[in-house]
Structure formats: C-alpha cells, structure tokens
Image (cartoon, grey):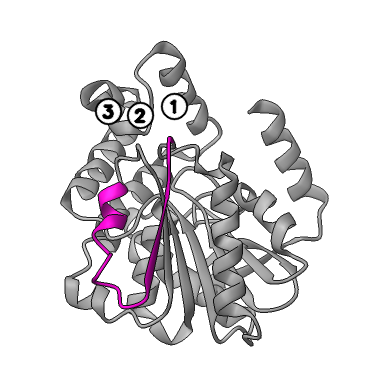
Amino acid sequence: MFWLRQKVAFDRAFSSRYATFESAGTRLTYTDDGDGPVVVLVHGIIGDSSAWNDTVKRLRNRFRLLAIDYRGQGGSDIPGNPDAYGLQMVDDIAALLTHTGVSRACVIGASAGAEMALRLAVSHPQMIDGLVLIGSGWSREQEANNYRRAGESIETHGSLVPWIKETGGEGYFDTDPYGLAMADLMLRGKDLGALAATFRGMVDIINLSEAEIRAIDVPVLGICGEHDIELPCLERMTGVVPDYTFKLLPGRGHMDTDEDPDQAKAIDTFLEQHLAGADG
C-alpha cells in the first residue's frame, strides 16, 4: 500500500491527467481521459480517483472517463465546515459535468460512490444515461447507522478500530490484528475531520423512497459480492427499478470485487449495450 500511494502521489505531481474546477466555493480535482460517450467514476468513501486507474486504462479507448476526488480527499480542497459535505458531494458530481460541458453521462459508483450515483439519478435525472452500482445501492437505516457509528469512531478516536471491535467489522474489515492494522492504514494521511464529516453526511444521501427509486428511467446494472453485507441493497432494487440487471459475484465480499474479471466483463457489456453511439 505504501508503494501504491507513492506511485499515486508521483502521478498527481507530474501527470497532465489531473485538472480542477470549483463547486460551491471548493476547489475539486478530477481526471479526464479518453474520448467517446462519457462515463463518470465515483470512488468509495475512503479513497480517491486513483482507485479507478485500472478501469480507466481498460476503457479509455472507447469512452471518455471523468473521475472525481471527493471534497476532503485526494487532491481536492478540504472544507472545514462539516455541513459542507453530505448532499453537496452529489451536487459536486453534477457540477463536474457542467464544468466539462457534458450534458449526459453514465455514472459508475463503488460502495458509497454507488449511493451517491443513485442519489444523483434522483436529484439530476436529466444528466444520467445509465448507472452501474458496485457493492451498494438502495441503502436504508442499517447502512445509515453504520455510517453514523463509523463517523463517530473516526471523530472521537481517530480510528475505525473501536467501531470494528464493537460491530465485528460488519463484513467490511476483519477483526484480527491484521484486519485492524489495515483499517488504520487506510486512514493514514487522510484529514480525519473531513472523513468523519463524509461518513456522517452519507446519512442524508441514502434512504431514498420507493417512489424515487421507481422513477429512475435509465438502465441500471447492480454488481455485488455473494458475501457482501450490502447485498440486500442491490437485491431489493429488482422489480422496483424498471430497467435493472443484477450481477452476483460468487465468493466475493465488499472489498474484493475488483479482483473478479466477471465484474469488468459485466461493466463492459453494459456500457457497450447502452452507451454505444451516445453523445455526451
């Protein structure tokens, strides 16, 4: 993980891939690669746009890929006010599309990024051509409680370990010494105030109503690991979202679906079917 972070830092310092724009007074960083129908990539709650580097390499010859750093993470600025997170993070994605002159795009989100993508389809439906939701989707109170408690753990203890020990890790982290060490390593170098605000702000993003979910009129692909605790968030969308396809990845959990080649195949097939010839 150390060398990967060094590689990302070097890329940020010297690559021309990164650009900035302003959203609600905050300078945000994003990457812009490739050409063709537009795909926006929204990373998980502890991460940044570099999480999509392999996806960008795979797809940039066929699509234009925009990957955003959340406010408070990656190369983006860090608002000090906790109220500057939450729903504003969804509006940041819409602001990125406006800044880049894109009228409509397919949005691919992973984990918390999937929940943001789903909210974006509800709040800015005119901007959405399709959705790919990986590892999360139509979240409810259980997920809201996890976000609240994890945010409190970061704010109070500067660590996720107390939350993991209290809950058993909820399938996101192992409770053995290695799992606990990895959880803290993921936070290293992060602004913990911003991260805590991001966790707490997710509560305002999720808990969409059934009517809002039913109103989504674009193709949606859900992808989830067999052992992912958030599997119900994707299963419950079947029969509610009018044009919904679900891909289950056997033997996978929440943190390792990127390692499954069937995930990449499912995404590629979805994009080719629904974005071929689309104009951003």
Disc 1 is placed on an element classified as helix
Of the numbered discs in the image, which one, if any, rests on residue 160? Answer: 2
Q: Reading the chain from its start, which is encountered first: label 1 or label 3?
A: 3
Spatial distance from mark 3 to mark 2, Cα to Cα? 5 Å
**Hey, what amino acid is under mark 2?**
Leu
- Quadrant for the C terminus in the image: bottom right
Q: Quadrant of residue 36?
A: bottom right
Label 2 with label 1: CB-CB less than 8 Å: yes
Note whether residue 97 is visible.
yes
Q: Which residues are magenta?
A: 231-251
Q: Secondary structure at mark 3?
A: helix
Q: Amino acid at mark 1?
A: Ala
Residue at 53% in and 49% down? 73
- At label 2, counting other C-alpha atoms closer than 10 Å, the crowd grade (few under 14, some 14-19, many 20 or more) is many
- Residue at the disc numbered 1: 183
Separation (CA) of disc 2 from disc 1: 7 Å
Residues tagged 1 and 3 counted as in contact (Cβ below 8 A):
no
Say whether residue 136 is left or right of residue 35.
left
Q: What x and y, as percent, mark residue 44?
A: 47, 49
Does the residue at mark 3 contact the one at mark 2 (Cβ under 8 Å)?
A: yes
